[in-house]
Amino acid sequence: MHIDISDADEQNTDGLSVDRADFDDAVIGETSIQEVFLNASTILRYLIGNDDQLETLVMCNPANQVFVTTDQDLYDALASMQSYETLNKNKLVKLLESVRVRPVDKRVILTHEKLEDIRKEALRGSAPDSSDKGHQD
């Protein structure tokens, strides 16, 4: 099962969104494993410490989920950090330990507009206002 924990789609009870268009089942033996995709804004929100629930999810992984992202999303998140934000190296190391980073075929240069969109979505976090659903992957 694939869960996208961005704020783009409908909210479940944990405040995380489920991307129903991208569901697939990964079955290992008799158990079903949830694959959770972390997009750039979710990674940025984790790195700048703006979401305690997300931090607990990544650091402790209480549901034994498989976290996945792309090298492009990781790059975009790191490049979206501002000079006044401190990068907690321990959190970055834990992220890299916990997340499978998959390569993309063609990397895209991060534009100023996309950087602003990533930051806007990351800083919005899990706010109840879901009127802005125009997120980019």
Image (cartoon, helix red, strand yellow):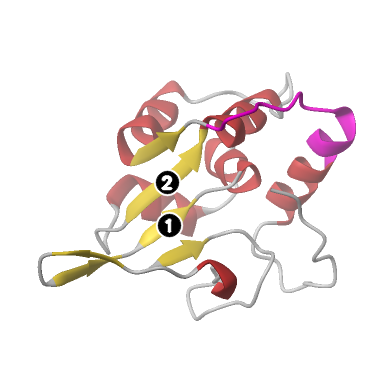
Magenta residues, as a range? 104-116
* Earlier sequence position, callout 1 versus callout 2: 1
**Residue 61 x %, y %:** 29, 54
Front residue of 35 and 122? 35
Residue type marked 1: Val
Q: Look at the numbered discs 1 and 2 and tell me whether their residues touch, using CB distance below 8 Å.
A: yes
Which residue sits at x=53%, y=66%? 22
Which residue sits at x=43%, y=64%? 2
Residue 17 in sight here: no
Residue holding disc 2: 68
Residue 38, above or below 62: above
Helix, strand or loop at label 2? It is strand
What is the number of the mark on residue 55? none
Inter-mark Cα distance, 1 to 2: 6 Å
Residue type marked 2: Val
Q: Residues within 10 Å of mark 1 (few under 14, many from 20)?
A: some
Q: Is residue 47 left or right of residue 112?
A: left
Residue holding disc 1: 36
Residue 58 belongs to magenta span: no
**Residue 3 x %, y %:** 47, 65
Image quadrant of residue 1?
A: bottom left
Residue 70, above or below 24: above
**Residue 29 x %, y %:** 10, 65
Q: Is residue 119 left or right of residue 107?
A: right
